[in-house]
Amino acid sequence: MKAIETKDLVKRFEDVEAVKGINLEIEEGELFGLLGPNGAGKTTTISMLCTIVRPTSGSATIYGHDVRKESDTVRGLIGIVFQDPSLDDNLTGRENLDFHGRLYKVPRGEIAGRINDVLELVELSDKADVIVKKYSGGMKRRLEIARGLLHHPKVLFLDEPTLGLDPQTRRHIWEYIGRLNREKQITMILTTHYMDEADQLCDRIAIVDHGKIVAMDTPDNLKHDVGGDVVIMTVPNGGEQLKAKLEQLEVVKSTQLVDSTLRLSVDKGETAIPIFMDVARQEGIAVPSISLHEPTLEDIFIKYTGREIRAQEAAGGFAGHGPGRR
Ligand SMILES: Nc1ncnc2c1ncn2[C@@H]1O[C@H](COP(=O)(O)OP(=O)(O)OP(=O)(O)O)[C@@H](O)[C@H]1O
Ligand SMILES: [Mg+2]
């Protein structure tokens, strides 16, 4: 039996179709990532799986239990680490966990022991009796993860588990997530808009854009799919013109221009670069920098969505109407 299965899952809010027919099959023990820009529908998708948001149509099951018809059973099987922090700042770490344990009806006699276990797991035992207000961002996240595990869920949902944390803390949290997944065989589904996070952590990734899955595979397969090299040229002026010229070359497999960054997929970067520079010179277009790299998830993302994920973040959120799209 699949840990998670959805069929044509749709969620419509009054005027927005946030999720437009998502099909997923996630195996037990899998660490699965939903990757996508702001507003792609990631949180809405997992909220439906968590029984928080009611699907408009389609179906979703957790270990065969329907999220709509058997929501109580489903809730007993899952743990959730939300995008928005939901800890009580005025309680200690231990009190927060205790409250959650009672909410989830963890047997009375077991609560204290389980709290100690999960606190140890996320290395917060020594902070257990400090009020959460005094925790750092990373400590709060770890406490939330501990809380998500308290009632021994079979499936753990993590919505943007490292959002806003510094790189070192993010890596630390990746380690916990990876270890929990391996050692406890907990199926995990996480959402992120960090490419490196998805790449490092996930067994499989679905790239979500405008409420739809546009690509789904292991990170390695997704990258091999693009193949070759990616040449990145900075073109402050005349990007469109240069793109049009280079597109005519046989060596160029695909191009994307985002702001002043021109990306070109080629088989062999070393031979393509001199040709590209010649064309730029002939056209009188300045290229202050040019670089070569193997395809990353970022390139995959651009290939499938035509947009750069970071550009939207910088622009302060994405409402679903990217430039030059649909
Ligand atoms: N309760 C709601 N009512 C109306 N529209 C909503 C509601 N929740 C989400 N939306 C809309 O649905 C779309 C998808 O939102 P969602 O929160 O699922 O995106 P996301 O991929 O999680 O984005 P982010 O990366 O910003 O967390 C957006 O256009 C959003 O404005
Ligand atoms: Mg979200």
Image (tube, rainbow, N blue to C red):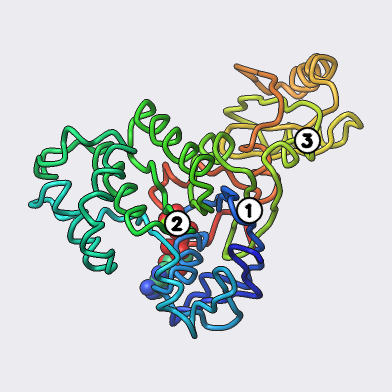
List the residue tagged with mark 1: 206
Residues at marks 1 and 2, CA–CA distance in whole angstroms: 15 Å
The residue lying at 46 percent from left, 42 percent from top is 180
The residue lying at 50 percent from left, 77 percent from top is 67
Residue lying at the far right in this picture: please name it: 250
Dividing the picture into quarters, in which one does residue 136 lie? top left
Nearer-N-terminus badge (1/2): 2
Q: Secondary structure at mark 3?
A: helix
Residues at marks 2 and 3, CA–CA distance in whole angstroms: 28 Å
Q: Position of residue 45 (x, y in %)?
A: 51, 66
Describe residue 163's horizontal placement relative to residue 44 as left or right. Answer: left
Say if 302 sits above or below 73 in the image.
Answer: above
List the residue tagged with mark 2: 157
Tag 3: amino acid: His
Q: Secondary structure at mark 1?
A: strand
Nearer-N-terminus badge (1/3): 1
Tag 1: amino acid: Ala
Dividing the picture into quarters, in which one does residue 81 lie? bottom left
Say if 78 sits above or below 222 in the image.
Answer: below
Q: Which mark is residue 224?
A: 3
